[in-house]
Every structure is written in structure tokens, then in C-alpha cells.
Amino acid sequence: MMRIFTVCFSCLLLGLSGCESDRFDHTPPAGQGTLIVDNLTSDTLLVYVDGHGVFDVSDNDHELIDLEPGVCRVVIDEKNGFHSYADYTDILDGQLTVLEVDGYSSANTYSVKVYYD
């Protein structure tokens, strides 16, 4: 009986924890979403959204920008280097769109994980 209780309690805790992270303590303004670039590399990153430079992200840091919901083109370029990333990304109303840059997928391309928080 105790084992069943332990399993049920563990499942409840797992369900309540969800996938949300408390790392990014930001709420997008009404009618907007937020793009966060989380730089887990040792490089300084230059970030462009729809062709406009929006911010630099220092190594092992993150930066954010509030944007209108929709699809935008994001380019991440290594400052003084040759690694990059480019793709279209969804910005969702009231949500955080996180681009986690965590290494290299090839000799000149960053490995980027996209998730919503």
C-alpha cells in the first residue's frame, strides 16, 4: 500500500512540475510574446530579428525582446567568429519563445533548441 502511495505522489509531483522553467522571470506585455536567446556557449552572439540587429548576448548569459505575435526570421552570428544560425521562429501571444544555443552542430553552425515557456 505504501508503495502505491509513493508512486502516486511521485507522479503528482512530476505532473505539477511540468516543463516550465523559473529561470526566465519575465511576462510579455499584453498582446505580445517574448523571444529569449539563451547563450550556453563561450561565444558572444549577435542576434538579428527580421534583418535588424536587436542585441548581443554574452557567453553563458541570456537576453530577451518583446515582439508582436507571428513568425519572424532570427539570425544568430558569432561575434568575431564564423558560427551562425538562421531560421524562422514563431512568437506566441503571452509566451516565451526560448532559443537555447548550446554548442555546434557542424563546423560553422550552432546547435539551437527551440521551446516555449
Image: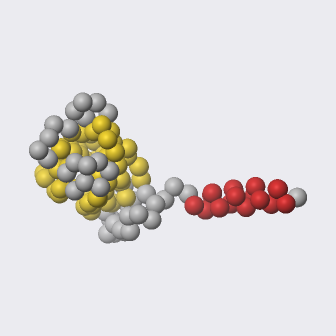
Residue 55 falls left or right of residue 33: left
Q: How is this picture coloured?
A: secondary structure
Residue extending furthest front? Answer: 42
* Rendering coords of residue 109 (x, y %): 25, 35
* Rendering coords of residue 74 (x, y %): 23, 46
Task: Tell me if residue 35 can be seen.
Answer: no
> Which quadrant, please, contains the N terminus?
bottom right
Residue 33 falls left or right of residue 1: left
Residue 25 lies in what quarter of the image?
bottom left
* Residue located 24% across and 30% down the image: 107
* Residue located 35% across and 53% down the image: 98
Residue 68 lies in what quarter of the image?
bottom left
* Rendering coords of residue 60 (x, y %): 29, 55
Number of numbered markers: 0
* Residue located 36% across and 54% down the image: 97
* Rendering coords of residue 94 (x, y %): 38, 62
Residue extending furthest right? Answer: 1
Residue 50 falls left or right of residue 114: left
